Each structure stands twice: as structure tokens, then as C-alpha cells.
Image (tube, grey):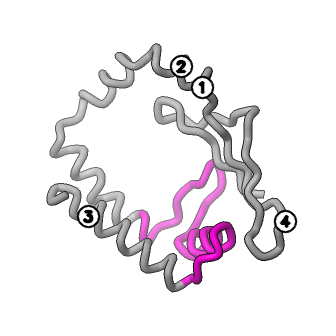
């Protein structure tokens, strides 16, 4: 089963509260997604100044450049999903398995996401 954590202050966090997502055809549980309940969000909002300070270390130009670099990584590279590697082909199969979208549509959406990230400064 794929396990997707919540990101808290940029760090993965496995919650006790999870949503189980079935495969759209087999209905077998396929993904476990950690949930951020209201209490968890309230706790994290108490540290909002720290989060803002971390983000303020970067200029807008640096953040846009990060998005531009992320565009090609998203489309072409193996990335971590939780603690497990996910190839672009894995992404296509997994999105299709949980949504029912045909692979061709998932790939088109990947291109749209890549384009948006690559052109962030024009958005």
C-alpha cells in the first residue's frame, strides 16, 4: 500500500487519522493518505512566524527558479512519494488507478503541471 504523509513545515508526518483510497476498478485499498485534522492545523498555525521566516529567506526570483527546476523533475525524474520512489510512469498508473482517468489524460495533465511550473513567472 502506498502511504502518503502530511507535510508539516516541509517535513513528512504520518498521522493517526488516515483516509484509505481504493483502486477504482478492484476496490482494493490502494493508498493511505495521512489527514491533517483541525487540532493539527491549529498547532502548526501557532508556529506561523517560524514558517514565514523560513520562506522569507528566499527571494521571489529564487522561488520562481525553484518552480522552474521542479517542472522538469516532476515530468522526468524518480521522486519520493512519502518514503518510496515514484517514477513518472508510476505516477501515471497510480493517478489512473485512483481516479479512473485514462493514462493519456494523466500524461496530458502532467504536461500542464510542468508547463505551469516552468512558466510560473508569467502566471
Q: Which of 88 and 123 is in front in this view?
A: 123
Is the residue marked by circle 3 packed among few (<14), some (14-19), or many (20+) residues within 10 Å?
Answer: many
Question: Which residue is at a point 21% across and 63% down the rendered structure image?
Answer: 119
Question: Which residue is at a point 73% across and 57% down the rendered structure image?
Answer: 21
What span is colored magenta in the figure? 74-103
Which element is circle 4 on?
A: loop
Q: Please report whichever mark, 3 or 2, sits nearer to the chain's N-terminal start.
A: 2
- Image x and y of residue 101, in percent: 59, 77
**To which quarter of the image does residue 123 belong?**
bottom left
Q: Please report whichever mark, 3 or 1, sits nearer to the chain's N-terminal start.
A: 1
- Is 113 above or below relative to 50? below
Is the residue marked by circle 2 packed among few (<14), some (14-19), or many (20+) residues within 10 Å?
Answer: few
Q: Please report whichever mark, 3 or 4, sits nearer to the chain's N-terminal start.
A: 4
Which element is circle 2 on?
A: helix
Residue that numbered label 1 is attached to: 38
Residue that numbered label 3 is attached to: 118
- Image x and y of residue 76, in percent: 43, 72
Q: Please report whichever mark, 4 or 1, sits nearer to the chain's N-terminal start.
A: 4
Residue that numbered label 2 is attached to: 42
Question: From mark 2 to mark 1, how far is it between C-alphas?
Answer: 6 Å
- Is 88 above or below relative to 21? below
Question: From mark 3 to mark 2, how far is it between C-alphas?
Answer: 33 Å
Magenta span contains residue 31: no
Residue that numbered label 4 is attached to: 28
Question: Which residue is at a point 61% across and 60% down the rendered structure image?
Answer: 85
Left or right, residue 110 beside residue 65: right
Which element is circle 1 on?
A: helix
Amino acid at each position: 500500500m502506498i502511504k502518503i504523509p502530511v507535510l508539516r513545515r516541509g517535513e513528512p508526518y504520518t498521522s493517526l487519522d488516515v483516509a484509505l483510497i481504493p483502486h477504482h476498478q478492484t476496490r482494493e485499498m490502494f493508498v493511505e493518505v495521512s489527514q491533517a485534522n483541525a487540532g493539527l492545523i491549529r498547532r502548526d498555525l501557532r508556529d506561523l512566524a517560524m514558517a514565514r521566516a523560513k520562506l522569507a529567506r528566499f527571494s521571489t526570483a529564487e522561488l520562481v527558479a525553484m518552480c522552474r527546476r521542479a517542472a522538469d523533475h516532476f515530468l522526468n525524474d524518480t521522486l519520493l512519494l512519502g518514503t518510496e520512489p515514484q517514477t513518472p510512469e508510476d505516477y501515471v498508473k497510480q493517478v489512473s488507478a485512483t481516479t479512473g482517468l485514462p493514462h493519456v489524460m494523466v500524461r496530458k495533465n502532467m504536461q500542464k503541471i510542468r508547463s505551469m511550473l516552468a512558466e510560473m513567472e508569467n502566471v
